[in-house]
Amino acid sequence: MTRLPLLLCLLLTSVFLQAQQLSLFTQYRENATLINPAAVEGDFLAYGQNLTFGASIRNQWVGVTGGPKTQSLRGSYLSTEWTGVTIQGGGHLINDVTGPTGFTGLYGRIGGIVTGDAEYGGLSIGLSGGIVQYRVDADKVRLREDGDVIGTQDESQIFPDLGFGVYYYQMLSGSMDGDYIYGGISVPQILGLDLTFQDENGEFLVQRMRHFYGQFGLYKFFRDDSFIEPSLWVKYIPNAPVNVDINLRYQLPSSLWIGTGVSTGKNFHLDAGFVLGENVGFDNLIRVGYGFDYSFSAFGPFVGSTHELNITFSFER
């Protein structure tokens, strides 16, 4: 869903802040392991690479003061040597700032894939754990335009966090021989803490809401080494409507890919990028992608466009 501006509600001497607190992504398939700790990287399904490192920069609502800004680094590895249970794991660092609030989190993840052969499919169960610092720039929080500020100094608190996910992928046979289907559900933020910040002017509360996600998709390969990937990202937060991102990406036989999509939150998506690998004599892969969002919702103020850049290095080890 489109991330809402900060909602301020005055209740006696307390201020209650509530909004979507986890980061959004236009190219969410590039950040699948941030969304679901059990997910298998797309580099493994599409290119057979089992070691991946990536970085992402996202500026949401460009032109709107205090619009969300997100940066992330990630790494993941999937062992292809074992049968029965194959181990995968990794971690990520993420920083997100929205108006006067922000968080920085460092996570590790570990998972097991129940499989006879990881190349052909399996059922993955994954856990993530980390430490998250939540911050509020109190002198920027106002009850109304030109109103009194809530506080006079920055506040921060550090808390542990846990995530859980289940993910399934399978290589198909018959008329779709060699294609993959995949799907998973996850709760990447299990601990629903209430973070109270207090100073001489009163107190305000940031409530951490649990987010429930679903990811589903298909890799359809063609003989010219191109493929298409239709996919869904389903998002649910209590007391908010279910939101669905619907996307389609086409990898051309050359190094380029293009994609498009829409969401039920009335966002339009475009993404494009290129792959450097065997086409330029590399044994490994370098992928660079750009994503663009535009909101056409008639509700609320104009929130501008969103720009996102991803770069990924993947290897076969």
Image (spheres, rainbow, N blue to C red):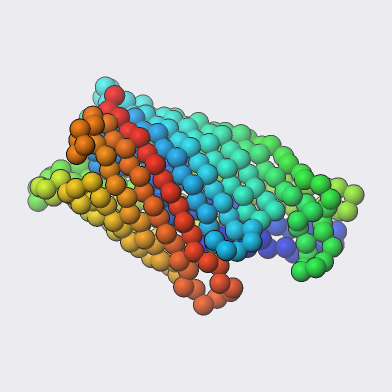
Question: Relative to 7, is 263 on the left or the right?
Answer: left
Report which quarter residue 45 is drawn in: top left
User: Which of 221 and 187 lies nearest the eye of the viewer?
Assistant: 221
Question: Relative to 177, is 61 on the left or the right?
Answer: right
Q: Position of residue 242 (x, y in %)?
A: 48, 63
Q: Quadrant of the C terminus?
A: top left
Q: Is residue 154 above or below residue 120?
A: below
| Point 41% across, 50% down: residue | 28
Furthest residue in direction right, as rendered: 200
Q: Position of residue 151 (x, y in %)?
A: 83, 52
Q: Position of residue 140 (x, y in %)?
A: 75, 56
Count of numbered labels shown in the rendering: 0
Quick check: can you spot residue 284? Answer: yes
Question: Relative to 190, is 34 on the left or the right?
Answer: left
| Point 32% across, 50% down: residue | 273
| Point 78% across, 64% down: residue | 143
| Point 88% across, 53% down: residue | 201
